Image (tube, rainbow, N blue to C red):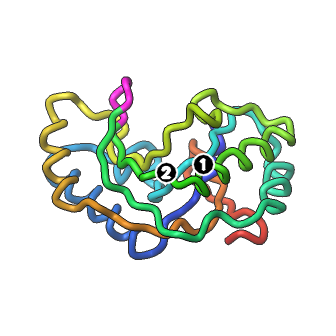
């Protein structure tokens, strides 16, 4: 079980990603729509914590300046080695600085950060299919590239318990 520090998408972009998840499910590709607890929301994870105190993390994050307000453009398709397929946003300088600030704030509480979220090695991504089979990659690409680009404004900073999908909006950020 982990706690993810996430930026949610604006309503229009959230709907676009959910429609994309639905289209992929209709062609037989399992997405976050049907994965595990089924409570997933389109999001960009800034930090993944393996050990934490919820109130401490919330307090530290509530003191941060807001996330960058400009648009972020998801215009690429990526895949990690272990088959997770995702949308790639063009990372802005503001987003990279905000992610580093989130990591510093959570570390200041004693939280244990997953190594893939270290500033400088973090790859921003929005998960589509958590367990994509290589033979489905062309199908996914066809569906995704019919939709891209998706331009979004990242909205509320939210903590998400990955085992249940329970969301905890950061105090003063939601």
Q: Position of residue 102 (x, y in %)?
A: 72, 49
Near-viewer residue (47 or 55): 47
Count of marks, rendered view: 2
Which dot marks residue 136? none
Q: Residue at x 32, y 54 (%)?
A: 75
Q: Which residue is mark 1?
A: 96
* Label 1–label 2 contact, CB within 8 A: yes
Give the residue furthest to the bottom: 12
Find the magenta span and give its range: 80-84
Q: Residues within 10 Å of mark 2 (few under 14, many from 20)?
A: some
Q: Can you say which quadrant of the picture contains the N terminus?
A: top right
Return the disc, 1 or 2, that comes first in the chain's sequence.
2
> Helix, strand, or loop for circle 1?
helix
Q: Is residue 141 magenta?
A: no
Q: Quadrant of residue 28?
A: top left
Q: Residue at x 34, y 47 (%)?
A: 128
Near-viewer residue (39 or 147): 147
Task: Give the answer, above or below, for where 97 lies relative to 131.
Answer: below
Q: Which residue is mark 2?
A: 91
Q: Residue at x 49, y 56 (%)?
A: 43
Q: Quadrant of residue 15?
A: bottom left
Task: Give the answer, above or below, for where 134 lies relative to 126.
Answer: above
Cα distance, mark 1 to mark 2? 7 Å
Task: Give the answer, above or below, for where 37 lies relative to 151.
Answer: above
Compared across the picture, whether 161 is left or right of 24 comes to right
């Amino acid at each position: 079980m982990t706690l993810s520090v996430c930026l949610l998408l604006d309503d229009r972009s959230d709907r676009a990603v959910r429609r994309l998840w639905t289209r992929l499910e209709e062609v037989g590709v399992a997405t976050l729509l049907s994965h595990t607890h089924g409570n997933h929301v389109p999001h960009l994870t800034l930090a993944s914590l393996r050990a934490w105190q919820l109130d401490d993390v919330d307090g530290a994050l509530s003191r941060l300046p807001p996330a960058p307000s400009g648009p972020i453009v998801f215009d690429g398709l990526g895949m990690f080695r272990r088959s997770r397929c995702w949308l790639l946003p063009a990372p802005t300088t503001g987003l990279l600085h905000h992610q580093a600030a989130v990591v510093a704030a959570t570390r200041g509480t004693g939280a244990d950060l997953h190594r893939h979220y270290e500033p400088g090695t973090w790859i921003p991504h929005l998960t589509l299919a958590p367990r994509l089979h290589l033979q489905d990659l062309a199908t996914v690409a066809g569906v995704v590239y019919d939709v891209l680009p998706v331009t979004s404004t990242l909205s509320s900073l939210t903590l998400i318990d990955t085992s249940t999908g329970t969301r905890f909006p950061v105090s003063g950020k939601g």
